[in-house]
Image: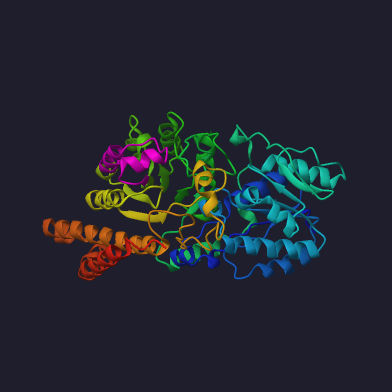
Amino acid sequence: MLDIVFSHSYYYKFDVKQWKNQTPYPPLGTLYAASYLRENGYAVGVFDANLLDDPTTIQPYLEEHKPNIFVLYDDGFNYLTKMCLTTMREAAFEMIKIAKNLDCHIIVCSSDSTDHYEKYLAAGADFVIQGEGEISLKELVDALSNNEDASQIKGLVFEKDGEIIKNPKHPVLRNLDELPMPAWDLIDIEPYREIWESGGNEFTLNMATTRGCPFKCNWCAKPIYGNRYNSHSPEYITKHIKYLKEKYDVTRFWMCDDIFGLKPNWVQNFNKELKKENLSIAYYIQSRVDLLLKEDTIEALAESGLEEVWVGAESGSQAILDAMDKETKVEQIYEATRLLKEKNVRVAFFIQFGYLEETKEDIQKTINMIKELVPDNIGVSVSYPLPGTKFYDKVKDDLQLKANWTDSDDLAMLFKGTYNTQFYRKLQRYVHKEFRKSQALQNFKKFFKNPFSISKAELRSMVLYGYYVPSAFIDKLQLKNMENTNA
C-alpha cells in the first residue's frame, strides 16, 4: 500500500509527431516531486504514462496500491506540456475520474491546470497547485495526512461552497541543490532505451540544471517556473551525471533548461567539474544567440561535450524579433552559427512563422537566413498564444472556436494572422524542403573536396536533392496562389 501515487498526462503515442521521433524522455518533473515527497517520509509510487496506450491502464495500478492521494504532476521541464494539448488534457480527465472513483484525494500540478484550473476542478480534482509544486505539495500532503486545514497553503486552487478559491503562489525554490535527485528508480528506464536504439539513436536521458527564464519574449509562457532563474550548482549536476552513468550506463544528455548556462561562469565551472570527475559526456541544449557570444562560452561548451545547441532564432526579420521582445539581433544569429560550426558543434534553429503583422518580406528573410546559414536542423512552427503572455492578450478575442492544439503537429493558426492555417502548413513543408536543398548543396561541395568524408546521411541528402528541387518549386507556386486566400 502506498501513501501517494504520482503520474502525469503526457502520452507520447497520442502525439504522432513526437512518437514518430522515437526519442522519448522520462517525466523528469514528476520524478523530482516523487523524490521530494519520499525524502519527507511518504511511501510513493510512480505510474509512468509516457509510453502507454490508454489512460485507463492506471486503474489496476491504483487498485493494487490503494493510495490515499493521487497526484497528477506533469513534467514542467518538457516544453510540450506548456502547449496544453487537448489530447493530453482529455487523458488527464480520464485518469482523474478513475482515481476519484477509487476514493483518492486528487491533486494536479501542470501547465494546463495552472492555466485552466476551473476545468480540472470540474473534472474532479480536489486541488490544483499553481506554479512550482514541490513545497506546496508537501505542505498539502502533510495537511491531508493529519486531517488539518489546507485552505491557507500557498499555491493552491480549490473549490469551497461553490466558489473557486485561488491562493497566492508559493515562492519558488532558490537553492535547487536542496532537492534530492529525481527518483529514477521508480520507473523502468529500459523501455526508453529500447525505443531510442530501435530508431538508430544513442540513448539519451533528460536533465535540468536550472528552473525559469528571466527573458521576456512576449509569446513565451512560464506557468511553472516563472521569470525567476535559479540554478543547480555544477557540482550537483556533475554528481547527477556520474550517478546516471554508473547506474544506467548513459553518457548522452538532453539539458532541458529553457536557457542553459546563463549564470556567469557556470559553463566554465561545469567543464572543470566534469574534468575533475573524469567524466566524458555528450549533451545538447537550448540557448540564446546573445548568450552564446559572451566571452569564451562556446569554447567551454564545446570542450565539456556540447554536441548540439538549439537556438531560438525565430525569424530572419529584425522587425519580427523586435515585435516579439526577443532582444536579439539577426546579426547575432549569423555570428553564433559561424562560431558554433567552427567548434564542430551542431546548430539547430527554432523558427516561428505567423507572428502578428508578419509580411511576405519577413517570411522571405527567414527563408533566406536558413538557406545562407544551413543549420544542422530546424524546427518550424507557427505562433501559439499561451495564457499569461502579452501575445495571448493581444489575440485572445480570436480564440473562440479553438484555443489549444490537438497535438504538437497541429500547426493551426488560432488567431487571425496574415495568412491562414493552410498557408502556414504548406509554408512549413516548403521551408523544410528549401532547407534540405541547401544541406544537399553543401554536401555536394564537401564531396567534391573530399569524397571519403561524406557520411551515409549526407550521401542520402545528395540523392534526395533531385526530389526536393521540383517538389519545393511546386510548393512555392501553390503558396503564391494561396497568398490571397486568408479565410
- Give x and y (percent) for residue 476: 26, 64
The front one of 289 and 48 is 289
Q: Is residue 311 left or right of residue 100?
A: left
Judge whether residue 311 can be spotted in this image. Answer: yes
The front one of 204 and 385 is 385
- Residue at x 60%, y 61% (from the top left corner): 88
- Residue at x 49%, y 47% (from the top left corner): 256
Q: Quadrant of the N terminus?
A: bottom right
The front one of 152 and 180 is 152
Magenta-colored span: 313-339
Judge whether residue 78 can be spotted in this image. Answer: no
Q: Is residue 473 left or right of residue 275?
A: left
Q: Quadrant of residue 342?
A: top left
The reply to whether the magenta stretch includes residue 427 is no
Q: Quadrant of residue 93?
A: bottom right
Q: Is residue 196 left or right of residue 28?
A: left
- Give x and y (percent) for residue 101: 80, 65
Q: Quadrant of the C terminus?
A: bottom left
The reply to whether the magenta stretch includes residue 334 is yes
- Give x and y (percent) for residue 141: 78, 46
From the viewer's perspective, is residue 473 above or below residue 308?
A: below
Colour treatment of the image: rainbow
Residue at the farthest right position: 147
The front one of 366 and 27 is 366
- Give x and y (percent) for residue 394: 50, 45
